[in-house]
Image: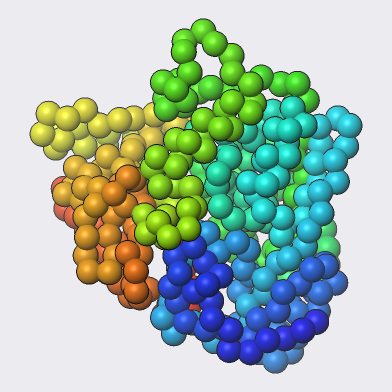
Amino acid sequence: MQIEENIPLAPLTTFKVGGNARYLVEARAADDVLATVEYARSNQLPLFVLGGGSNLVVSDTGWPGMVLKIGIRGVEERSDGVFEVGAGEDWDSFVALTVNRNCAGVETLSGIPGTVGGTPVQNVGAYGQEVSETITSVHVLDTATRQFKDLSNAECGFAYRTSIFNSTERGRYIVLRVTYALRPGGAAKIAYADLKKYFPEGTQPTLQQVRDAVREIRLSKAMLIVPNDDDCRSAGSFFKNPIVDTSIYEDVAAHANGSVPPKYPASDGKVKLSAAWLVEQSGFAKGYTRGAVGISRRHSLAIVNRGGAAAADIIALKEEVQKGVHEKFGIELSPEPVFIGFE
């Protein structure tokens, strides 16, 4: 276990902001993860687990304890479409592999930055698919008992953008490997409006065609990481789509000045509002700028670092947007990224 000191965290994130970690370890095996947890505990160091840094805002003061970067690699493929994948594997590279193997189930999740280990944490989803539809188990370290264990899909408590890993058991489990059950020879999923518009009605595109389409759509919205493009210097979609009762939706519509708020069906008879629509209708158009930060010119849900931004600038714009949406529609927008090092 090699411990590094005073390591800048900004280069390890897609936002490119934040201070230093007091200590950092990159663990390439499960035993290294356990050793790091025990070291942090015995030295009374707060511990943060870092994956791909794509859904993260680090404070300007950094992290005062230990950062554990998960570098566990490896993909074990079985003949029945089951893949067991190390948490440190690049997510989009794994999706590309599954498409190449003609296994359906995650093709619309192409182009999402980050690592495999982050996907069960927030139940990553896009364009009509969520990883909870294909995850069968998650191999973890239970930091409470310091034992390795497998959690079933049901035990992960998946819901919209949530799981036990980022809610009821936040900080308890460290994801080491994830097992996905895909559909060999299965058809691509074309459920999302953008994909339906992309392909002619009545056609059945291949998995590769869907993957290419999703990446092209994400690129058009600056949601694909491209070097030197400041619209991509972000944490992706910054706010979750609110899930509300139909009565609240009707109240939002009444304050929409003639515009019809987009809505999507959700569980328990509720509806999912478009956070992007709420942001734009509250006065924050694409390209809105506030000093060194702003709203992406191509995606109204992405807060971006225009260059030289501090974490404090991102927080200030986040709060400005939340306040604006609440004042106009009475809706509390919840952020998607993880925030570390903030009081």
Which quadrant: the C terminus? bottom left
Count up the numbered dots.
Answer: 0
Question: Hey, which residue is sitting farthest front in the picture?
Answer: 228
Please state which of residues 304 and 56 is positioned toward the viewer in this rendering: 304
Image quadrant where residue 107 sits:
top right
For residue 163, say whether it is visible.
Answer: no
Which quadrant: the N terminus? bottom right
Please state which of residues 291 and 127 is positioned toward the viewer in this rendering: 291
Up the image or down, 205 lies above or below 147; here it is: above
- Name the spot of residue 253 as percent of width and height, x first: 20, 32
For residue 304, say whether it is visible.
Answer: yes
Image quadrant where residue 15 sits:
bottom left
- Name the spot of residue 340 as percent of width and height, x first: 49, 73
- Name the spot of residue 172 as percent of width and height, x first: 67, 66
Judge left or right: residue 2 versus residue 231.
right
Up the image or down, 109 lies above or below 140; here it is: above
Judge left or right: residue 111 versus residue 30.
left
Judge left or right: residue 199 versus residue 304.
right
Q: Residue at x 61, y 74 (%)?
A: 48
Up the image or down, 202 lies above or below 170; here it is: above
Q: Residue at x 46, y 13 (%)?
A: 200
Judge left or right: residue 246 versus residue 139.
left
- Name the spot of residue 273 as percent of width and height, x first: 34, 37
Question: Hey, which residue is sitting farthest right in the picture?
Answer: 79
Q: Residue at x 54, y 87 (%)?
A: 64
What sort of colour scheme is used for the picture? rainbow
Q: Residue at x 54, y 11 (%)?
A: 203
Image quadrant where residue 168 sits:
bottom right
Question: Hey, which residue is sitting farthest top in the picture?
Answer: 202
